[in-house]
Amino acid sequence: MIVVPESAIPALIDRGAAFDAVEGVFAAMSRREAYNFPVIREDIGYADALYGFKSGFDRAGLTLGLKSGGYWPGNEAKGLTNHQSTVFLFDPDTGRLKAVVGGNYLTALRTAAASAVSIAHLAREDAKVLGMVGAGHQSAFQMRAAAEQRDFERIVGWNRNPARLETLAKAAAEIGLPFEAVDLDELGAQADVVITITSSFEPILKSHQIKPGTHIACMGTDTKGKQEVEAELVARATAFTDEIAQSTSIGECQHAVAGNLIGASDIVELGAVINKDHPGRSSQDEVTLFDGTGVGLQDLAVAGAVVELARAAGTAVETDL
Ligand code: NAD
């Protein structure tokens, strides 16, 4: 069995490898070669923690396993990250434990890779302005991965607490792009690609704020009740997602579906676009929206890549169970 500790992971896997792993598994999901098992998420009644499992099997990549973890709100006071997770990979031929991989950094990397894959396949080729809504832990990961997908000239950003945009401004400077804090009207008027990455339970962006041709990646909504954009905007856009069952139940599309503005059959798997079974964007004026709900197979895909990279680098820690 191989152990890849959290501290070793940033040096092993880069954004390009995460992009390839996530794009590959979305494609395999759409070919029905990979599927996610039902998600378990429980309020354990201790330490205010939410704990659960996301798992699945990719027959194409032969990746079997689970991500176990959750949210411990008291961690920050202990100097730890509130979100904690670990990935366990099993040998699909024998069921033996194959690897244990730290899941915290990988979660941010694979979530950013998902929106980057959506931008690569759905945004207008001539997109010049990237708009960021949200400035929490995930946001800089999102921004860096997105910035590599088009020839962006500038980034505009909005956050409920504008002071936190400083982190994004710093990351933008490192990428070499100008960054401006704006209000939501200005953000929608300027941005050709928008990423929303917040914990909001209310729509932040309204349909009238989004100009024709925009690609929006809604990445924050991963739970029943959360919402980042108006349901009318989801209905106006062509909606794409990682997994339709999650999109209609816990993703951004849940509200448009509950309000009968769209049905599940209106939502397209991003994997179908990757596999060229769906044309993706059909016109320069079309608004495309990616509902990135976050699936266990994404975690397994990047963890599998990390194990191979650790082996190749000779840094894999082998141990018997
Ligand atoms: P964080 O706690 O570090 O930051 C939260 C962000 O949401 C901040 O920018 C905050 O200002 C904003 N926010 C919270 N409530 C808001 C409201 N009512 N209106 C406007 N903005 C609001 O969280 P994070 O780690 O950056 O994660 C952001 C979200 O992404 C979380 O909801 C998390 O569950 C989700 N997430 C999704 C995936 C996925 O695969 N889709 C993966 C990881 C995290």
Image: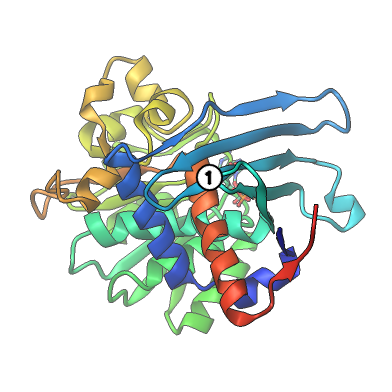
Instruction: Identify the residue under disc 1.
Output: 93
> Depth check: 74 or 168 in front?
74
Near-viewer residue (224 or 54): 54
- How far from the left and from the top, in percent, is residue 164? 64, 61
Please state if 207 lies on the left or on the right of 283 as rendered. Answer: right
Name which quarter of the figure residue 154 lies in: bottom left
**Element type at mark 1:** loop
- Quadrant for the N terminus in the image: bottom right
Task: Tell me the kind of residue under disc 1.
Answer: Asp
144 relative to 204, above or below: below
In the image, taking residue 236 as reference, residue 175 lies left or right, namely right
Residue at the spot 14% in from the left edge and 44% down from the top edge = 278
Looking at this view, is 170 or 263 the one in front?
263
Judge whether residue 262 can be spotted in this image: no
- Is 30 above or below relative to 312? above
Which x, y percent locates residue 129? 31, 67
Residue 7 in the image, given as x and y percentages of width and height: 74, 70
Residue 147, quarter of picture = bottom left
Identify which residue is drawn at 35% across, 48% down.
26
Q: Position of residue 319 (x, y in %)?
A: 79, 62
Mark 1 neighbour density, 10 Å: few (under 14) some (14–19) many (20 or more): few
Residue plotted at (53% across, 83% down): 174
Where 79 sits versus 278, above or below?
below
Which residue is at 57% across, 66% downward? 306
Residue 117 visible (yes or no): yes
Label 1, ligand 1: CB separation under 8 Å: no
